[in-house]
Amino acid sequence: MQNRILVAYATKYGATEQIAVKIGDVLHQTGFKADVLPVDQVETLTTYQAVVLGSAVYAGQWRKEAVAFLENNEKRLAQIPVWFFSSGPTGQGDPVQLMKGWRFPEAQQPIADRIRPRDITFFHGVLDMKKLNLGEKLIVKGFKAPLGDFRDWENITHWAASIAEAVKQDVKQAQLTP
Ligand SMILES: Cc1cc2nc3c(=O)[nH]c(=O)nc-3n(C[C@H](O)[C@H](O)[C@H](O)COP(=O)(O)O)c2cc1C
């Protein structure tokens, strides 16, 4: 399990998958083996020394497969270093401000409190009208949500690098502890 990190994601239209791939690339460049997988294709967590878990946000909720993953793997996730991210808001500025204070799905806060992730962050997302179904188009128009790709790759890279650094520090600490 040494040096292997899982980046598990839940996406509907692919924007969150691309964020997960970027995080995996950064982890790989910093010396880790990173498996980037859709949450519903993860078979075991025993081979990973850390987990990064992310989901697209729809109507203030994580995708149901990400919620199921959290619930099914709570015990293991509470034993290893874990990072959570959500992706969604479009428009300029801090995602939390854009989403009026939303940081993480309220329904999953109790499980997050038990797992105690090292960090929970919120990235900008993408809105591409061509991909949405009719109902989604109406919702997006109703909210006048800005269209386009607002993902901040520098911020995503920086966050992934901070994860690599933290896991390396853990390893050093473990080597120092008799
Ligand atoms: C119908 C609909 C509802 C959405 N609701 C939210 C929301 O509540 N909060 C948010 O931050 N983003 C919301 N979004 C934006 C998506 O999270 C964003 O498009 C994201 O990048 C989609 O990721 P995916 O391509 O991985 O599915 C919504 C988008 C749609 C189409």
Image (cartoon, rainbow, N blue to C red):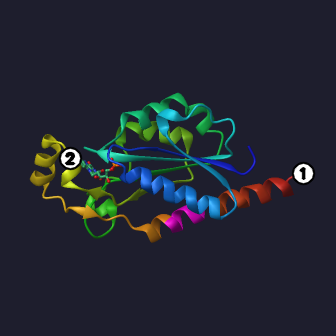
- In the image, 61: left or right of 81? left
User: Magenta stretch?
Assistant: 157-163
Q: Quadrant of residue 146?
A: bottom left
Q: Which residue sits at x=68%, y=56%?
A: 32
Q: Which residue sits at x=56%, y=60%?
A: 25
Q: Quick one: SS at disc 2?
A: loop
Q: Quick one: SS at disc 1?
A: loop
> Disc 1 designates what residue?
178
User: Callout 2 environment at 10 Å: few (<14), some (14 to 19), or many (20+)?
Assistant: some
CA distance separating discs 2 and 1: 55 Å
Name the kind of residue labelled 2 in the image. Answer: Leu
> Disc 2 designates what residue?
132
Q: Is residue 82 above or below residue 156?
A: above
Q: Which residue sits at x=25%, y=66%?
A: 91
Residue 2 included in the magenta stretch of the image: no
Name the kind of residue labelled 1 in the image. Answer: Pro
Q: Nearer the viewer, mark 2 or mark 1?
A: 2
Task: Return the x and y of residue 139 as percentages of the image width and height.
Answer: 14, 47
Q: Which mark is residue 97?
A: none
Task: Return the x and y of residue 135 as percentages of the image width and height.
Answer: 13, 41
**In the rendered image, which quarter contains the N terminus?**
top right
- In the image, 40: left or right of 143? right
